[in-house]
Image (cartoon, helix red, strand yellow):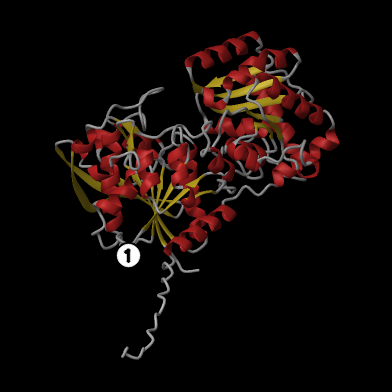
Amino acid sequence: MAQLNIVFIASEATPLAKTGGLADVVGSLPHALKQLGHDVTIILPFYRQHLIKNNIQTQALPQTIEMWADHKQHLCPLHEAKVDGLRFALIEQDDLFDREGLYGPAGGAYDDNLLRFALFDRVALEAAATLNKRVDILHCHDWQTGLIPLLLKTQYQHYANIAKAKTVYTIHNLAYQGVFPADWIHRLGLPTHHFHPDGYEFYGQINCMKAGIESADMITTVSPTYAQEILTPEYGCNLEGFLKQHSQKLTGIVNGLDIDDWNPATDKTLAANFAAGKIAGKAKCKQALQQQAGLDIDAKVPLLTLISRLAEQKGIDLLLANATTWLERGYQLAILGSGESADEHALSKLAKAYPKQMYFFCGFDENLARQIYAAGDIFLMPSRFEPCGLGQLMAMRYGNIPVVRATGGLKDTVIDYNQVKSKSTGFHFEAASAQAFDVAVEQAISAFQTPTIWSRIRNRALNRDSSWQASAQTYADLYQTLLKPAPKKKVRKTTSRKTKPRK
């Protein structure tokens, strides 16, 4: 396989800046592509506060790119960071990106987000064009980079190093589309001839995700099931018809994990290490968390865990509808997350009412998250929709058995005990209801209370291959397919028969 020059353009990536799973994918998939022999560069905004907080060392590059946007000339110096063998090119514009939040204050969004990311997209294209060799693939992610495939085809096709690049556009979550008032079109110099229902127009407004869907050479989502779900009214977020028009270039590729980073056998944040066949350390992790959280120390009590953004999408209402019942049955709960204030308040109230059985940490702490994954017996993911999900992969990696709603990537990555007992790694439920969720949890509790059954499920979960290797190869094959020359059309030869002239 020929070496490709691949450029990822995204709004976040671990370990530089992160709000969610997008950062995990952009920070880890390039590693797997590099292992396959490809050259990968990642272009991100220069988030000064986050880079300092995460101890990322950067070096100023000699290039500064000038860009006109919203009646103002912006000077955008370029920086470089090299982290774990990956090269990051960072675009500085402190007026727009030196802020506490990546996209907005807690629970909100910045009013100038379209300006921020439209400027970033343009400068990223010019930065990609300055690389030392021709770019083969521009891989863009979510609405923040949705304008790039459109801009490349309409306004940047004359840049030699990117003119022949193929664009891949990955939808990580269709619910966030980047919709803004149409008056930004002229303020940002966007191509007006694509502002129509078959382009990036959406009920009279700009839709950045529609721009990516329309103009990209290939569209991917982060699981095969989600790729099918978004073509339906239930999951399509009002784009199902538009996506069907482009379904011939839509595919789903499930996410993976950096299994060297997420490894209970070597994780230094844990009270004890463990692995399949060497499971004693997991019991020590459970005991350590129970002690740290002020819970009753009891190896036999089921410890239910949840690490999540607190939002309707994540099914937190289904958890809250059952939590008191589970606590009354004697189970323990350890929850880490933040989001809707009503959910935070309800969980805090429950934790105060049942201090020996329930622990709630409002916020996010990665070390604590790892400790909860390692300590837990059962991991809860009652999502109403979940494009892929990484929590269930991390949980299985740490022997924490998932109970998930059968949607999106949860359905694709967790093998249901009720369907294939001999290969199961968790439990599914179909309906987004508190009752269905409770039934699935009770099935998991029943298995937990039967040590031989539980040991088999847990070992299968611990041994599951959640690495990026297979998915990275699928992406690499997709890239190669895009770069193949289009087959030449056969021209039918016509022969003329000589005829004698009529007399």
Task: Please tell me in which quadrant of the rendered image residue 394 appears.
Answer: top right
The residue that label 1 is drawn on is 133
Compared to residue 501, the image places residue 440 above or below, namely above
The residue closer to the viewer here, 316 or 296, is 316
Horizontal side of residue 217 vs 94, given as left or right: right
Q: State the quadrant of the C terminus.
A: bottom left
- Residue 229: give x, y in percent of width and height: 55, 38
Which amino acid type is shown beneath numbered disc 1?
A: Lys
Residue positioned 50% across, 50% down in the render: 29
The residue closer to the viewer here, 219 or 8, is 219
- Residue 24: give x, y in percent of width and height: 49, 42
Compared to residue 214, the image places residue 350 above or below, namely above
Q: Could you tell me how many numbered marks the image carries?
A: 1
Task: Please tell me in which quadrant of the rendered image residue 210 appears.
Answer: top left
- Residue 466: give x, y in percent of width and height: 62, 47
Task: Please tell me in which quadrant of the rendered image residue 446 appears.
Answer: top right
Task: Classify mark 1: helix, strand or loop.
Answer: loop
Residue positioned 56% across, 31% down in the render: 385
- Quick check: can you spot residue 448? yes
- Residue 145: give x, y in percent of width and height: 35, 43
- Quick check: can you spot residue 15? no
The residue closer to the viewer here, 166 or 21, is 166
Category of crowding for the residue at label 1, using alpha-carbon neighbours closer than 10 angstroms: few (below 14), some (14–19), many (at least 20): few
Horizontal side of residue 36 vs 89, given as left or right: right
